[in-house]
Amino acid sequence: MLVVESKKAFAMKVAWAGIFIAVSAATAPVWAADDVSLWRLAICRDSWLDWRANDSVQLKTFGDDFQANFSRSGSGGYFVPKTSKSIEGLPVVQVFPESVGMGVGFSVVVGATFAKTQQTLERALGKALKKCDVSDNMRTCELEIGEKRTLMLMAEDNAKSTKTLLGCYYYYEK
């Protein structure tokens, strides 16, 4: 009799687990697909500046893909994804493909806090961002990757801020 009750208990647990999995799958949010090209450009692994000088085919391929997946947002100088996109699990909010402010490069605004973005970036790079500063109501970090490649991280110095800019700058005014 004890064996029969154990089988019933086991069957009940399996049934509840099945219900839980079905409900979880039905209510789970749709996660954005990671865009490896954006990530590689944002962290200085690739450079459109180099492509322009040495690989026009790669530049055109990326440009065509970018135009298909992003649309210009008014006169703001940035683009927004047509469908959900992410980089390293961080949702992409805006992309500045050529410049932002006084910098020339490639940058992405993600929907995450500065701390979360910094942690994700440092984990992916395998090294810490060393030059970090808080001034003029902004938090920044930078890491020189090589000639004409400086990785930048910037966000408003506000605990409630959930947008962070990260990007690779080829030239920028200090």
Image (cartoon, rainbow, N blue to C red):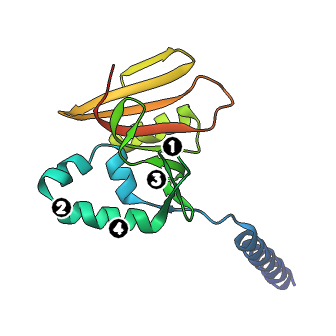
x then y, percent, for residue 13? 79, 74
Q: CA distance from mark 1 to mark 3?
A: 10 Å
Quadrant of the rendering where the C terminus is positioned = top left
Give, as a three-letter code, the residue at label 3. Answer: Ile
Inspect the image, locate mark 2, and give the three-letter code of the amino acid beneath it: Ser
Mark 1 to mark 2: distance in Å? 26 Å
Given this view, does label 1 or label 2 mark the residue nearer the observer?
A: 2
Out of 27 and 34, give the one closest to the viewer.
34
Q: Nearer the viewer, residue 117 or 44?
A: 44
Is disc 3 placed on a helix, strand or loop?
Answer: strand
Q: Earlier in the sequence, mark 1 or mark 4?
A: 4
The residue identified by callout 1 is 109
Which residue is at 73% across, 69% downward? 24
Q: Which residue is mark 2?
A: 56
Q: Which residue is mark 4?
A: 64
Q: Mark 2, residues whose alpha carbon is within 10 Å: few (<14), some, or many (≥20)? A: few
Q: Residues within 10 Å of mark 4 (few under 14, many from 20)?
A: few
Classed neighbour count for the residue bearing mark 3: other residues with Cα under 10 Å, few (<14), some (14–19), many (≥20): many
Q: Viewed as shown, does residue 28 lie left or right of 79?
A: right
Where residue 137 appears, as percent x and y from the top left, is: 57, 18
The furthest residue to the front: 75
Q: CA distance from mark 2 to mark 4?
A: 12 Å
Which circle, 4 or 3, is nearer the viewer?
Answer: 4
In the displayed structure, does residue 86 sit left or right of residue 13? left
Q: Nearer the viewer, residue 54 or 116?
A: 54
Element on which disc 2 rests: helix
| Residue identified by numbered label 3 | 87
Q: Secondary structure at mark 1?
A: strand
The earlier-in-sequence mark between 4 and 3 is 4
Pick the residue in front: 73 or 21.
73
Q: Earlier in the sequence, mark 1 or mark 2?
A: 2
